[in-house]
Amino acid sequence: MLIVVSPAKSLDYESELPTKKHSEPRMLDETQELVDVMAEKSPAEIAKLMSVSQGLAELNHERYQDFEQPFTTDNARPAILAFTGDVYLGMDPSGTFTERDFTHAQKVLRILSGLYGVLRPLDLMQPYRLEMGTSLTTDRGDSLYSFWGDRITDQLNADIAESPGANVLVNLASNEYFGSVKPDRIDARIMTPTFLDSKNGGPYKIVSFFAKRARGAMSGWIIRERIKSAKTLVEFDGMGYRYDAERSTPDEPVFVREDGAMG
């Protein structure tokens, strides 16, 4: 079983690390190609390309200028401990993972990245911002989807083959990031959990903020509990969600929650 999640825009390179474990990203040749393209852009060009403020553009311009190899614990940080968005707040590796959990996460969790392709949790990464949906022109086309081509799918297939448990890819990534994967070429069953909320007795719907947290919570649960089978996924009850058999299909399990049920 292998889980895929999205990265986050918010980063933490200051707090104390709960583990000294780390590894090196496996697609650094491609990463360097993208860095070389981005390093040639001015802050104004970055602002336009990414639709960000001038301040963020200048910060990321500086990041691309400062990018250097080799990665060390002085200039980089394990990916799972660098990202701090809603998915990672829901997962809470710093607060809940043991050393064994970090080791297991390395086998079963993958982070899809516009710059790094496929990251293992403990892969060192330097700070960046480059969303997968960015229309960046390279020698391979006019988008990051064309740049990565089959590479992300091929890497995931290799990782699925080595992962423990059922031959399942659990898609807990956003559509933007899972768009870098070619589902028809994945050598595994793909399961895509959905999380729905109802407020004041109203209709169930996806609430982005809660859905992101829930994806992280499910990822953390799979890791900590060593979940290895597809049928066990329906037992997830984190954050007050519960499996809804009527709304679910075998490959798209649905979890629902009413306001006030947060666990």
Image: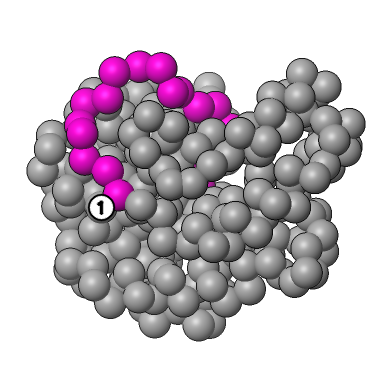
200 lies left or right of 216: right
Please state the horizontal and vertical placement of residue 207, each as a whole percent of the image: 57, 34
Residue 244 visible? The answer is no
Residue 27 visible? The answer is yes
> 258 above or below 28?
above
Query: Which of 28 and 121 lies nearest the eye of the viewer?
Result: 28
Give the labeled residue for mark 1. 106
> 13 above or below 249?
above
210 lies left or right of 51: left
> 185 above or below 168?
below
| Three-letter code, disc 1 | Gln
**Colour logic:** one colour
Q: Residues within 10 Å of mark 1 (few under 14, many from 20)?
A: many
The residue under the point 78% across, 63% down is 138
Asked if residue 103 lies in the magenta stretch, the reply is no
Please state the horizontal and vertical placement of residue 46, each as a whole percent of the image: 81, 37
Please state the horizontal and vertical placement of residue 124, each as a whole percent of the image: 38, 43
Please state the horizontal and vertical placement of residue 192, each as a whole percent of the image: 44, 60
Image quadrant of residue 78? Answer: top left
> 253 above or below 45?
below
Work out which quarter of the rendered image holds the C terminus and state it: top left
The residue under the point 16% across, 42% down is 101
30 lies left or right of 103: right
The residue under the point 66% across, 49% down is 35
The residue under the point 46% across, 76% down is 154
Give the overall secondary structure of the magenta segment: loop
Looking at the rendering, the stretch of residues picked out in magenta corresponds to 4-23
